[in-house]
Structure formats: structure tokens, C-alpha cells
Image: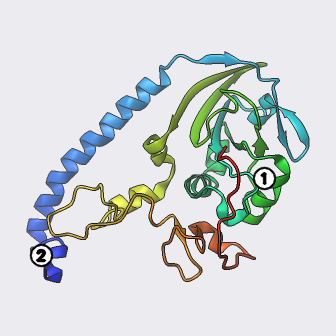
Amino acid sequence: MSTQDKRPPVVDRATWQAARDELLVKEKAHTRAGDALAAERRRLPMVEFDGTIEVVGPDGPTPFIELFQGREELMVYKHMWWDGAPHQGQCEGCTLAAWHLRQTEPYLNARGVSLAFVTTGVWDEVAPFTEFMGYTEPWYSVRDLDEPIGGEMGHHTSYLREGERTFLTYSTTGRGSEVASGTFAVLDMTPYGRGETWQDKPEGWPEGEGPCWYWRVDSEGKPTWGGTGRPAPQWTRPGATPETELGRKGDHH
């Protein structure tokens, strides 16, 4: 198979522009459909819960309502945790989500929305991890707490406060979380997309690899889910060293 079979056809600029304009019509329809979904999302009912329930952070037990930092709205990412695992063994998907969200806090705050991260890890393990990652956003342990504060991790969850009353308004996970991680949208604009096997692509194009294959890389930048891999952003951190195993022990909380 020639290299030419694995790339878009080459045309003149006018032909490209006509095809681009045709796609633009569909892209605009997609955007408007997303706006309509967001409007429905804003109309969801909400669930009241006890905001005095305590989570654990750098200052010890803390009432959940304090995560609002005095603002009306709160967005929380629920980060999965592997008990006893070293930094390189922690969840690669949640690292991807958290790494993207850390850039949004100033804009969320400017709009009156607070940002926080919660995880089921015990605080004594969570604290050194957040220090290693360079996270400056608020993090808390929700060990043994039920929904809507604790519960299943890997979710983006939003809350509303009305005085001393607190409400769950929305939660999403899986591919519903992609909107908060800009890397996906950027890759979707490239010729080969995410390079994953499930994608629809022209016949003869690269087959791609399994989902998430590029979330972990070794010290040379080569994707790997073996013991030498770390969640990709960790290699930007001072003190990140090559390792030989993920060190995951016990249950995945």
C-alpha cells in the first residue's frame, strides 16, 4: 500500500474550499445541537443534600459547603484513586481530566464558579500526589462518603448553593467528560484524529490503536501501558524518573 493511500487526496484550493464549506454547514448544525442540549441541561431538576458533611483536605475535616468558596456554583472533578500506588500508578484518565481542568480555574472563578477535586484516596496519600503534580486547586478526600459528594469517581459534577442549602445539578462521565479536555477536540481536527481503532476512517488508512493508547508514555515519550509508563503530563514534573512498575495494590476505589 502506498503512502498516498494513507492520506487525504490532493486537490486545488478552490476544490478544497468547496468541500470545507460543505462541512462547515454540518459543523454549525452540530454546534447548534450542542447549544440546545446545554439549554436542556440547564433545565434539569436538582437534588438537595447535606452540605455540612465533611470531606478531608489540607486543613483537616472540612464541610463540603466550603468548597463553594462563597460562590453560588461549584464544579467538581471526582478523581479515581489506587490505594498505595506511587504517582506513576495513579489513574491516567483522571490525570488527563485534571490536567486540563487546572487551566480553567481563573475563568471559572471570574464567572462565579468554584473548582475543586475530590478523590477516594486517603489524604496522607493524596497530598504528596497533588504536590508532585503541581496542582494548586483545592483537593479533598471523600473516603467512604456516598453520592452526591463521594460515590463513583471519574465524573464531572456540578453543584448549586443557595445560602446554606446545597444541591446536585448535573453529573457526567465517560465520553460525556470529553468536553472538558480540549486535547480530544484538537486531535479530532487532525487528519488521523485520535488514532484509535473505533474511529470511522477511509479504507486503507492507519488502523490505529486501542482507546487511550497515548495517555501513558515512557521516559522517551513512547506510548506504553506497561510498568515503565507514566500518565503523560507527569514527565513535565520535576523529579519524575523512569520506573519499572505501576505499584498498584488492593482495590481500585
Rendering quarter of residue 63: top right
Please name the amino acid that badge 2 sits on. Answer: Val
Q: Is residue 50 left or right of residue 197?
A: right
Q: Residue at x 76, y 56 (%)?
A: 84
Crowding around mark 2 (Cα neighbors within 10 Å: few <14, some 14 to 19, many 20+) is few
Q: Residue at x 66, y 27 (%)?
A: 147
Q: Which residue is mark 2?
A: 10
Q: Is residue 203 left or right of residue 115?
A: left
Q: Which residue is mark 1?
A: 126
Foreground residue, 35 or 150?
A: 150
Seen as rendered, the residue at the extreme front is 250
Q: Nearer the viewer, mark 1 or mark 2?
A: 1
Q: Residue at x 52, y 67 (%)?
A: 225
Q: Is residue 54 left or right of residue 196?
A: right
How far is mark 1 from mark 2, CA to CA? 51 Å
Local SS, label 2 = loop
Local SS, label 1 = helix
Q: Residue at x 70, y 50 (%)?
A: 250
Determine whether 52 is above or below 80 in the image.
above
Give x and y (percent) for residue 241: 70, 78
* Residue 110 showing in the rendered view: no
